[in-house]
Image (spheres, coloured by chain):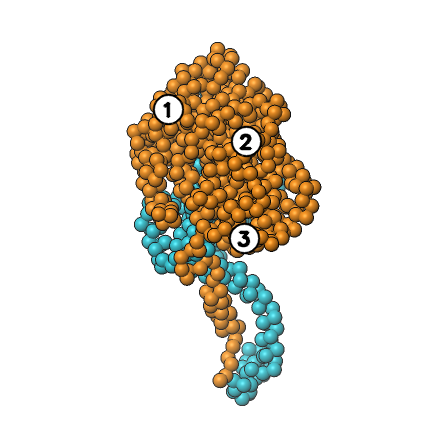
Amino acid sequence: MTRQLTDRPRAVVEAKPAATPRARWSARTRRDFFVFLALALPNLLLIAVFTYLPLFNNIYYSTLDWTLGSASATVVGLDNYVTFFTSSDATKVLGTTAIFTLVTVGGSMVLGLLVALALNSRIRGTTFARSAVFAPYVLSGVGVGLVWLFIFDPGYGVLAWLLRGLGQQSPQWINDPQLSLVMVMIVYVWKNLGYCAVVYLAGLQSLPQDVMEAASLDGANGFKRFVTMSLPLLSPTTFFLLITTMLSSLQAFDLIRIMTPLGNGTSTLIYEAYLQAFGAFNRAGYSAAISVILFAILLIITVLQLRFVERKVHYS
Amino acid sequence: MALNLDRRHFLGLAGAGAGAAALSACGGPSTAGPAPATAAADIDFSGVKPAASIDFWSNHPGKSQDVEKAIIEKFHAKFPEIKVNLVTAGANYEEIAQKFQTSQAAKSGLPGLVVLSDVWWFRYYSNGNIIALDSLIKQLDVKVDDFQKSLIADYQYEDKQWALPYGRSTPLFYYNKDHFKAAGLPDRAPKTWQEFAEWAPKLKASSGAQYAYIYPALAGYAGWTLQNNLWGWGGSWSDEWKFNCDSAESVAALQWAQDSIFKDKWAGVSSKEAADDFAAGITSSTISSTGSLLGVLKSAKFNVGVGYLPGGPKNESPVCPTGGAGLGIPSGVSKEVQLAAATFLKFMTEPENTAQFSAATGYMPTRTSADMTAVLAATPQIKTAMDQLAVTRVQDNARVFLPGADQEMAKSAAAILTQQGDVQATMTALKATLEGIYTKDVKPKLKS
C-alpha cells in the first residue's frame, strides 16, 4: 500500500505534542530570528532613515508657516492645505499636472506600442532601431533638456530655422506658458517612449504563437488579430506600464526644471512644491503641504489601479 | 508574557518604531516662539583670531571665475594664514540663494562669505541669516566712504550695513553699430523709446536681423529691465509700498511694449539671454546687464555700441535701475570664520581689486578711488556704464523686497509680451498678487 507523500508531514506534526510558547521560542528559532535581524535590519534602517523619516518630517513641516532659512516657524495646523485648495493655484497646478500626466503617459504608451509593433516585424536594421529607440531613455534629463532647448529656441534653434525656410516665424516655445507645456511634453514623450517600446516589444515577443496562428488560420487579418488577440494578451504589460509611467510622470522634474525654470505654465504638483520652497517664495511649510497632497494622490492612484484596473488584466 | 514575534509582526513593529522615531526626531525650525531678533547687537570681535580657512560661495557673476581666482591668489600672498576656498555655489543668483537657504535649514555647510543679489539680501536679513558688518568695518578699518554712495546705500537698513557691493551693474543699451550705420542712423543709443520707434522700421529693413530690438528673456530678470519702460512712462511696479503696476502710466508703458512686438513687429522677446542673441546678430539692439559687456565684446563679430537706457514720454531720466550683487557674511558660522571672511571681503572690495574685477567682467567699480585708467583704455565702453551710475534710480520696493515678485512680474510680462494678453487685466491681477505677498510675507517683518 502506498501512502500519499502529502500525508507524511501531517502525520509527523500530529505526532508531536502541542508546542508551548516557550518551546516555540527555541534556540533554533532564536538563531533564525537573529539571522533575520542581521539581514533585514540594515535595510529596514535605511528605509526608515531615508524614506519614512523624511516622509514624517514632511508631514510635520506641512503644518507649519515656515520660511525656508528662518530659524523659527509657527504651527498653523491645516492652514497650508486650506490655502492651497482655496487659491487659484490649486486649479492651475492640478490642471497642469493632469494634462501633463495624461498626455505623457498616453503619448509614451501609444507611441511606444506603435514603435514596438514596428520593431517586432522581421525587417533589416531592427536591432539598431531598438537601441536607437531606447537610447533617449537612459540619457540624462538635464542633457536632453538643454539640447532640446537649442532645438526649440525661436532665435537660432533648428525648428526656427526650418520655419523661417518656410517663411514662418517660430512660436515662442520658451516664453509662452501654453507652448512651454507643449514643448516639455513633446520632449518627455520623446525621452520615455523607448522604455514603453522595449517593454511592449518584450510583451509582443512572448505572445503565444500557436494562438496567433490559429486566429490567422481562422481568417483574422492583422488588424483584427492585433485588436482582438494581441491587445488583450498584452494587458499585463499595459497594466505594468500604466503604473510605472504614471508614477514617473507625476514625479517628472528634471526636464521641467531645465527647460522652464520659472515653471510658467509647466508647474506640476512636484515642480510647484519645489518652486514654493526653493524658488523665490521660500514657503517651506506650504511646499511640504503640496508634497503631501502629491503623495496622497500617488497613493490613491496606485491603490485604485491595483484594485480596479488589474481586474481587467488577462494573465493568460 | 510570551514573546510571539514572527516576521510580519517584526516588520509592523519596525515600521511603527520608525514612524515614532521620525516624529520625535523632527528637526527643522523652532516653534517655541518668535524669530530671534535679526538686528542683533554689534558683535564684538576683539580678541577673536581669524579662522584658517573659509569658503567663498559665488556664482561667478559676469563669468568672473578666473578673476575671482586671481584675486584670491593675491589674498593668499598677503594673508597666508587664511585660506579661501572658492566654491561654485550655483549658476545664477537664484541657485546660490537656494543652496544658501538649504544650508540654513540644514544648519550645516554654511560658507564664510556669500554672493547675494539685490532681490535676496533683504530676505537674508529678515530671516536673520546674515550679520551686520558695522563692527567688522570698524575693526578692519574698511573705507566705507570710498564706496559709490548709491551702491553701498542699497545694503543699509536700520542704520546698519548688511553687505558690501561686489558685482554691481546697471542695464545698458547695446546696439550693433554696423546695423545703425547701414540704416543711416546716428552712432548712439536713442534718447527715448519714441525716437527708437522711428528708427526701428529702418533698422529692420536694412539690417537683415530678425528684430530691431529684443526684450530681455522673461525667465531672467524681466522685472528689473522693464522698470526702464515703466519709469519712462511715469509708472512703476510700486511706489514705496503702494503697488501701482496697474496705473494708467504703467499700463501705457507695457501696452507700448506689446505693440512693438505684435502691432509694429520690430521687436521680439529673448528666450534665454538677450546679450547672447545680440552677440549672435539676431537683433540690432537690446538691453542687458553691464556684466555682459565683456562677453558681448568678445563674442560679437561686429562693432558694438553701448549707451544709456532710453527714456519715455514722461521721464527721460533717471530711468535706469541699479542691480547686481553684494557680499554678505552668514550669521550661522563662528566668529573666527566671520572675521576671516570680513578680512577677505575687505580685500576683495579694495580699489585695486574692484578695478581688476571690473576690467574682467564689465561690472562697475564699487570704489570711487579705483584707478580705471588702464581698464578704460582697454574697454572704453565701461565708461558709459560708470557715467550712467549718476543717473540711476533706486529699484521699486515691489521688485527687491517682495519674495517671488520678480518671478510674478516675469509671468505677467510673458502674458503681455508673448501671449498678447490684456495689459490692464494682467497688471490688475499682478497688483493683487503683489499685495498678497506683501501682506503675508513682508509686512509682518517690517519694523514699524
Tag in front: 1 or 3: 3
Colour chain B is painted in: orange
Q: Residues within 10 Å of mark 3 (few under 14, many from 20)?
A: few
Tell whether B230 sits left or right of A4.
left
Tag of residue A81? none
Instruction: Provide the secondary structure element on which disc 2 rests.
Output: loop
Question: Is residue B372 shown to the viewer in this render?
Answer: yes
Residue position marked by numbered label 1 in the rendering? B315
Label 1 – label 2 distance at C-alpha: 28 Å
Q: Residues within 10 Å of mark 2 (few under 14, many from 20)?
A: few
Residue position marked by numbered label 3 in the rendering? B44
Q: Nearer the viewer, residue A219 or A248?
A: A248
Residue position marked by numbered label 2 in the rendering? B368
- Going from the N terminus, do you reach mark 1 or mark 3 first? 3
Question: Are marks 1 and 2 in one subunit?
Answer: yes
Identify which residue is drawn at 51% across, 46% down: B134
